Image (cartoon, rainbow, N blue to C red):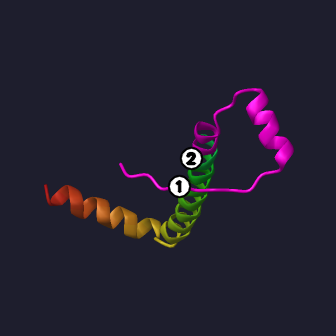
Amino acid sequence: MGYVTVSAKIPRRLKELLDKYKLEVGPIIRRYLEEEVKKKMIEELEDLYKEMGEEISKVSDEEVVKLIREDREGR
């Protein structure tokens, strides 16, 4: 797995507090970014799920029955 460097400007006071409490910035930033990406991926999947539901609802019950019968007969 390759890595890239991401930098950000933060208020001086925040940097002082990070130093005071000996917090490692890298793991904190990685966790936060991973969580944000997960949220966006879930949103994208939810949108896709809604679209699929709308498309599936357009299929009539008769068509579903027909497809099931064809599948059973094909076995």
* Furthest-top residue in this view: 21
| Residue 17 versus residue 74 in the image, above or below | above
| Residue 8 versus residue 31 in the image, above or below | below
Q: Is residue 38 left or right of residue 8?
A: left
What's the residue at 62%, 51% (across, down)?
39
Residue 16 or residue 46, whichever sits in front:
16
What's the residue at 36%, 62% (across, down)?
65
Q: Position of residue 22 (x, y in %)?
A: 70, 27
Give the structural element (helix, strand or loop) at label 1: loop
Residue 40 or residue 17, whichever sits in front:
17
Q: Is residue 9 magenta?
A: yes
Q: Is residue 4 magenta?
A: yes
Q: Which residue is mark 1?
A: 5
| Residue 22 versus residue 58 in the image, above or below | above
Amino acid type at image mark 1: Thr
The magenta segment is: 1-30
Image quadrant where residue 43 sits: bottom right
What's the residue at 23%, 64% (across, down)?
70
Amino acid type at image mark 2: Glu
Compute the Cα span from label 1 to label 2: 15 Å
Give the structural element (helix, strand or loop) at label 2: helix
Q: Earlier in the sequence, mark 1 or mark 2?
A: 1
Q: Which residue is mark 2?
A: 34
| Residue 38 versus residue 73 in the image, above or below | above
